[in-house]
């Protein structure tokens, strides 16, 4: 299942950051799975690509944890899709994940560039 | 979040197909959106769709991984296991049906017996603070059998005691009711003023007798039972103040008691005031309520002390007598406790047997599933998960069995309650129901049995070595074999214990039923009544004589007489009498015995032979010297080695007559078939008129057809004279041994269930082992073993199990003798005849159980068996 050539410069999403990316994407408003994957790809400048085999398990896992809600709606171009949105707990979790990510970035930067 | 998660679990579990559809829709919509995106970029619909699919990847795999994120909580796991187990059981319906039926039988019988135990022994009596209620009774010299109380002693106890807050005397009293010109006698209770306040039950209507009064002149008042209110007055609310006609007097109804009110062993319809008559003999029962904080032991001790005082104060009546206080519950249910406990123990063994059988079946099933288990273990299921799965399977079976056992138990209880004769006198049987407590017990038993029968298969499955099981073929699986053999031996031992219990009670019952009562009960009709009062006492005797003369004239009547208190009632009048030519014996050396007041014709009607002298005749009347007849036991007691005829006796009876012995009559068993004859003195009703009479009528054929004619003749003598009960003597004899018959029947039923279960267990084991050893047997036959030899080998295997189990059972019986002894009549608990025959039955049954598989083994075609490998 190797992807087509035009995606060759994408990189694998770091373990554990998918949750953050999903939560962050949904912070802008409800979205379906396809839309989430498009949004991540677009906002990362086509660098980050989410495999469906990771995306859907993650969505269902986050929903089970109570961070996401879901409902079926009709999309802009008239297609039925399952829309996910952040719950209150999801918003809290997003803040926590963001803090964690910043900590990680600073730490990694510190390692790469010991000033 | 926890709530959310739980809801999630339930939603997912119960709408699983719905959720899976939703997931598929979700993934499909993803692909559709990608495709339409691509079409907007100019790709052809077909190419766009292909590309979208390709990009998406393996849809099934994505779905699978996503589903796995739904995860399983323990609850979901358990529900899942239940589904899995249920599917497994549905696939093997015969196996499941046998297991569930076995369990339902075991749990159902336990539930039934427990409901009896609960309603009769454990449940408190329906009175406020019922544990404070005690029955007080006197103890005759040299015995420990509770006796009724002398009124003087009752008064002494009541006035002197410090242990009781209140105390009342009562006496059974047939009450002659005249309603709409027809008369009947219903059971009633004469009670002293404090009776109702002692029991502490308020009336449903009106008031009860006012406590604290001693009546010398009894008020003309009556309290109705709820049943009498309904029956006689159709439950009319304005009954208070109405009068009711009782033996010529009119009593004013002052109250109605609530439904269900009554002492545990009484069926009184009316309560009448009982005055204090200090001239009366020992005739009264006494009930008392303890003061707060006084123990039953302390009260008992005080009553003993008071009895010692009254014994000193009134040597004539009380010398040698003591007294005791027994809790009311103990007093009423004490006699049936041993039988109930034996039945409960027996049903426990039946349940254990059922569990052993089910464990055995599960073990066999498990050995067929060893591959399945090993695969699951190899695939990473933890041992705990497997154990959990097996536990769930056991619980599911037990719950099914338990649920089925409730209607089963209800039916059994219903049958038991409706089929028992009224005369059986099982106290409180009407209070027995399948209440919440019984259902809880049933549920507890179900779960407990699941643990018991599920344990062996579960442990067995954990001992399994995965790689070994996966490599070896199923043919040589022997795991669980030892456990199964052990279980079958235990089953046989339990069955032997139960069948022996059944055998002993049956043998004891047959002994009892074949006891020579001394009289001929067939074709005898009895009619009991309290005689209505008349102006002069001897007129009462004339009434009886007139009734008998009229009845004798009915065609088909062979002989007729009467007696004060009928045989087979477990009671009689008692007093003492002594040789009138000797000095009066000291109070503690009085020759005591029964007294029966009869008319001429009684012995003939009962076919009791005269040994010496003559029967009473028409000439033995008032005004001529008083006469008496002795039974053989009394003759031996009073005049050992002499001819009693012509001797004179002094009798402690009304007016203390001196009587001349005119005859000796053969002994009969008067109280019951199980009690040997007491000394008995017979006196003629004409000379010693008795307030009660029971007509005894011998007929040519079955007496039932003469009931109406006899009623009619009694009515002709006095239209107001009611009859308490008309009953065939044979029925009375049969009823008197109804309880041992019931015990023997129930134990036989349990014994048969046990034998059936054990033989099924043995059959299953042998059949299974024959199937598993088919190859070995094939080789033996191929090597020249004779079919008879194979047959003997299989049979011998079964027999060995039976014998070991049987010996274990016999050892257990030897240890259990004291529990069943109280139920047995003239049979020892280790009765060799019973034990030997029961063991023989067991051996025959187990040989039968082994016969079929053994035959099958001999029919095996060695070539076919070996080819199969």
Image (tube, coloured by chain):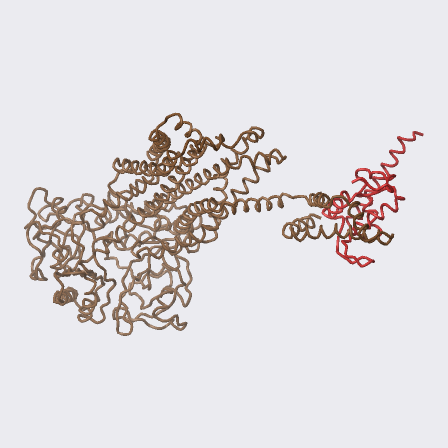
Chain colours: A red, B brown
x, y percent for residue B462? 55, 32
Image position, residue A23 (x, y; %): 81, 47
**Residue at position x 48%, y 45% from top?**
B96
Q: In this view, does B66 lie above or below B229?
A: above
Identify the residue at the far top of this view. Answer: B783
The mark total stands at 0
Viewer-nearest residue: B382 or B293: B382
In the image, B867: left or right of B53?
left
Look at 31% across and 37% down and name the residue there. B844
- Is any part of residue B301 visible from this angle? no
Locate residue A84 relative to residue B224 in the image: left or right: right
Task: Return the residue nearer the eye: B473 or B270.
Answer: B473
Q: Is residue B846 visible?
A: yes
Give the vertical position of A15 relative to B595 (above or below).
above
In the image: residue A80, left or right of residue B432? right
* Residue A74 placement (x, y as % from top left): 78, 58
State which quadrant residue B553 falls in. bottom left
Residue B60 position within the rendered picture, expressed as x and y whole percent measured from the top left: 71, 45
Closer to us: B215 or A68: A68
Left or right of B28, for residue B86: left
Q: Nearer the viewer, residue B547 or B160?
A: B547
Relative height, residue B341 to residue B223 (above, below): above
């Amino acid at each position: 299942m190797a992807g087509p050539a035009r995606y060759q410069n994408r990189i694998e999403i770091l373990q554990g950051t998918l949750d953050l990316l999903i939560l962050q994407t949904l912070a802008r408003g409800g979205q379906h799975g396809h839309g989430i994957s498009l949004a991540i790809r677009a906002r990362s400048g086509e660098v980050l690509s989410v495999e469906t085999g990771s995306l859907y398990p993650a969505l269902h896992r986050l929903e089970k944890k109570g961070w996401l809600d879901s409902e079926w709606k009709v999309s802009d171009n008239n297609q039925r899709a399952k829309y996910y949105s952040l719950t209150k707990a999801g918003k809290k979790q997003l803040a926590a994940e963001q803090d964690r990510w910043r900590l990680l970035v600073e730490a990694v930067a510190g390692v790469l560039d010991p000033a | 979040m926890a709530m959310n998660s739980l809801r999630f679990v339930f939603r997912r579990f119960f709408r699983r197909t719905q959720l899976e559809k939703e997931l598929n829709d979700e993934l499909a919509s993803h692909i559709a959106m990608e495709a339409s995106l691509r079409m907007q970029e100019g790709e052809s619909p077909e190419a766009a769709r292909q590309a979208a699919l390709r990009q998406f990847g393996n849809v099934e795999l994505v779905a699978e991984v996503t589903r796995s994120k739904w995860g399983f909580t323990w609850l979901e796991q358990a529900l899942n296991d239940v589904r899995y187990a249920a599917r497994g059981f549905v696939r093997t319906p015969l196996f499941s049906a046998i297991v569930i039926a076995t369990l339902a039988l075991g749990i159902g019988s336990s539930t039934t017996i427990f409901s009896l135990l609960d309603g009769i022994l454990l449940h408190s009596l329906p009175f406020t603070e019922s544990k404070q209620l005690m029955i007080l009774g006197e103890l005759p010299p040299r015995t420990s059998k509770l006796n009724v109380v002398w009124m003087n002693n009752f008064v002494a106890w009541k006035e002197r005691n410090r242990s009781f807050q209140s105390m009342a005397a009562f006496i059974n009293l047939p009450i002659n009711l005249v309603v709409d010109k027809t008369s009947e006698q219903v059971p009633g209770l004469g009670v002293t003023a404090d009776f109702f306040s002692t029991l502490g039950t308020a009336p449903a209507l009106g008031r009860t007798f006012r406590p604290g009064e001693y009546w010398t002149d009894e008020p003309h008042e009556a309290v109705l039972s709820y049943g009498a209110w309904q029956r006689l007055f159709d439950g009319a609310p304005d009954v208070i103040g109405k009068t009711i006609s009782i033996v010529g007097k009119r009593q004013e109804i002052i109250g109605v008691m609530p439904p269900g009110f009554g002492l545990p062993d009484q069926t009184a319809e009316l309560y009448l005031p009982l005055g204090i008559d200090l001239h009366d003999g020992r005739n009264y029962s006494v009930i008392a309520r303890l003061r707060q904080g006084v123990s039953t032991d302390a009260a008992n001790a005080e009553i003993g002390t008071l009895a010692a005082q009254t014994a000193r104060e009134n040597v004539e009546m009380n010398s040698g007598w003591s007294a005791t206080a027994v809790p009311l519950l103990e007093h009423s249910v004490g006699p049936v406790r041993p039988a109930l406990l034996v039945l409960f123990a027996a049903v426990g063994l039946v349940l254990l047997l059922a569990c052993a059988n089910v464990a055995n079946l599960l073990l066999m099933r498990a050995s067929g599933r060893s591959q399945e288990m090993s695969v699951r273990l190899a695939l990473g299921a933890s041992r705990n998960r497997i154990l959990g799965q097996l536990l769930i399977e056991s619980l599911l079976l037990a719950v099914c069995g338990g649920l089925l056992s409730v209607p089963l138990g209800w039916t059994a209880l219903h049958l038991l309650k409706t089929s028992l004769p009224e005369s059986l006198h099982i106290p409180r049987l009407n209070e027995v129901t399948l209440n919440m407590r019984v259902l809880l017990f049933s549920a507890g038993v179900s779960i407990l049995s699941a643990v018991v029968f599920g344990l062996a298969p579960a442990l067995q499955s954990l001992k399994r070595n995965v790689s070994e099981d996966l490599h070896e073929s199923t043919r040589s699986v022997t795991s669980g074999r030892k456990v199964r053999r052990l279980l079958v031996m235990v089953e046989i031992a339990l069955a032997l214990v139960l069948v022996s219990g059944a055998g002993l009670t049956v043998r004891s019952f047959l002994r009892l039923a074949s006891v020579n009562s001394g009289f001929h009960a067939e074709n005898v009709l009895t009619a009991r009544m309290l005689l209505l009062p008349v102006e002069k006492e001897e007129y009462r005797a004339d009434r009886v004589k007139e009734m008998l003369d009229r009845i004798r004239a009915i065609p088909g009547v062979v002989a007729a007489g009467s007696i004060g208190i009928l045989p087979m009632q477990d009671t009689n009048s008692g007093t003492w009498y002594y040789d009138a030519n000797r000095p009066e014996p000291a109070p503690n050396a009085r020759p005591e015995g029964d007294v029966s007041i009869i008319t001429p014709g009684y012995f003939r009607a009962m076919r009791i032979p005269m040994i010496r002298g003559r029967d009473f005749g028409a000439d033995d009347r008032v005004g001529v010297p008083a006469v008496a007849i002795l039974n053989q036991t009394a003759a031996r007691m009073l005049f050992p080695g002499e001819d009693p005829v012509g001797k004179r006796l002094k009798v402690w009876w009304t007016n203390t007559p001196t009587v001349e012995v005119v005859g000796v009559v053969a002994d009969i068993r008067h109280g019951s078939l199980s009690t040997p004859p007491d000394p008995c003195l017979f006196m003629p009703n004409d000379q010693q008129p008795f307030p009660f009479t029971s007509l005894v009528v011998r007929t040519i054929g079955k007496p039932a057809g003469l009931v109406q004619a006899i009623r009619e003749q009694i009515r002709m003598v006095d239209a107001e004279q009611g009859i308490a009960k008309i009953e065939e003597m044979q029925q009375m004899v049969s009823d008197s041994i109804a309880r041992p018959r019931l015990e023997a029947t129930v134990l036989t039923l349990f014994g048969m269930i046990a034998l059936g279960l054990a033989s099924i267990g043995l059959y299953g084991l042998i059949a299974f082992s024959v199937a598993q050893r088919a190859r070995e047997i094939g080789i033996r036959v191929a090597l020249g073993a004779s079919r008879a030899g194979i047959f003997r080998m299989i049979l011998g295997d079964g027999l060995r199990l039976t014998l070991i189990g049987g010996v274990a059972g016999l050892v257990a019986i030897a240890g259990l003798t004291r529990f069943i002894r109280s139920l047995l009549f003239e049979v020892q608990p280790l009765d060799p005849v019973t034990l030997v025959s029961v063991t023989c039955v067991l051996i025959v049954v187990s040989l039968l159980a082994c016969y079929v598989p053994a035959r099958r083994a001999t029919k095996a075609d060695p070539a076919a068996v070996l080819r199969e490998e």
